[in-house]
Image (cartoon, helix red, strand yellow):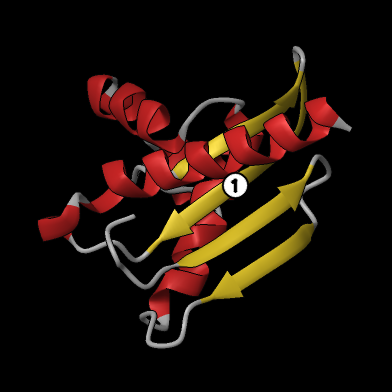
Amino acid sequence: RHGSVVTITVLARAGRTVAMVRDDGASPHSVEHSLRKAYTALTYNMPSAEYGKNAAGNPGSAGPLHLANITTAAGGLPIRAGNTLVGAIGISGTPGAKGGGAADSQCAQAGIDKIAKGLATN
């Protein structure tokens, strides 16, 4: 939509990477950051941005921020089939001038919506 080069990581429910796509020219650190966004969304069953807001509002509980693959950045969303958590998606790489993590989250939601629509018609 906005022409950014990004990395997209999709995780299965058990946390295993099932897909990772890196645009040509995407920053090397976007690979790890997209994984962290997806992992945070998966393990906390909420968007990574929401986890970040919760963490910022409760600085006494910063312990989980020291765990591997946890981030407070926007761009990670849980993937659900009905009410069941089945995986997560994380997108990283959109520059702040083009919306940053918020744009990454919108892109992730658009991907989830497109896949869900395709499944509903089959």
**Picture residue at 77% right of the left edge, 14% below the top:** 82
**Residue 121's x, y, as percent?**
82, 28
Relative side of 8 to 3, left or right: right
Extreme-left residue of the structure: 97
Image quadrant where one finds the C terminus = top right
Q: Quadrant of residue 28?
A: bottom left
Decide which of 27, 114 is in the foreground and name it: 114
Q: Which quadrant does the N terminus fall into?
A: bottom left
Tell me if mark 1 has few (under 14), some (14-19) or many (20+) residues whose alpha carbon lies within 10 angstroms of its own.
Answer: many
Counting the numbered discs, the total is 1
Residue 89 left/right relative to 13 = left
Which quarter of the figure has residue 51? Answer: top left
Outermost residue, right side: 122
61 above or below 65? above
Residue 101, x across and y down, in percent? 30, 48
- Closer to us: 75 or 63: 75
- List the single residue furthest toward the top: 83
Identified at 79% across, 60% down, the residue is: 18
Residue 71 in percent (x, y) is at: 42, 48
* Amino acid, disc 1: Ile
SS of the residue under disc 1: strand
Q: Residue at x 33, y 28 (%)?
A: 55
Query: In x, y percent, where is residue 46?
Result: 53, 25
Which residue is denoted by mark 1 in the rendering?
Answer: 89
User: Vertically, is 50 above or below 2?
Assistant: above
Which residue appears at 37% of the width and 73% of the height?
5
Would you place residue 34 above or below residue 31 in this image?
Answer: above
Q: Quadrant of residue 78?
A: top right
